[in-house]
Image: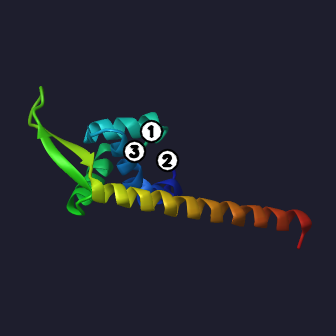
Amino acid sequence: MGKQMTEMLKGTLEGMILAILAVRPAYGYEITARLRDEGFSDIVEGTVYAVLIRIEKRDLVDVEKVPSEKGPPRKVYSLNAQGGEYLEEFWGTWSFLAERIAQLRQHIENTQETGE
């Protein structure tokens, strides 16, 4: 993954993780695996865990410790009401930005084609 992709992902990873948790509760490795399944193959667990700590501190998720067959209990994260509101705002912001970027790109391409 290029540096530009990494920088862009930093700004959206919280929303992406909350979107995954909106489907069902999950622990860190499950979230990482889901992101990789969705094509974000270079995302590392450490990055996901850093975001999970951040969203937990901001009270966007509920955390339950669940016994693990291997080692210490796992922290299972689930989206709470505050996280759901944040996710809804994230999707609205994402849609706004995606539309404006597409418009800008189209305008620039049209300008280049016409030479104006």
The residue shown at (25%, 53%) is: 61
Mark 1 is surrounded, within 10 Å at the Cα level, by few (under 14), some (14 to 19) or many (20 or more) other residues, namely few
Q: Real-space Cα distance between discs 2 and 1?
A: 8 Å
Pair 2/1: label in front: 1
User: Which circle's residue, 2 or 3, is located before the other in the chain?
Assistant: 2
Q: Type of residue at label 1?
A: Ser
Q: Are the residues flagged by discs 1 and 3 in contact, CB closer than 8 Å?
A: yes
Q: Quadrant of the C terminus?
A: bottom right
Q: Is residue 86 left or right of residue 73?
A: right
The residue shown at (31%, 38%) is: 24
Q: Are the residues flagged by discs 2 and 1 in contact, CB closer than 8 Å?
A: yes
Residue extending farthest to the top is 69
Q: Which mark is residue 43?
A: 3
Q: Position of residue 25 (x, y in %)?
A: 27, 40
Q: Position of residue 60 (x, y in %)?
A: 27, 57
Quarter of the image where one finds residue 107: bottom right
**Residue ID for mark 1:** 41
Q: Which mark is residue 1?
A: 2
Residue extending farthest to the bottom is 116
Is 12 or 71 nearer to us in this picture?
A: 12
Q: Type of residue at label 2?
A: Met
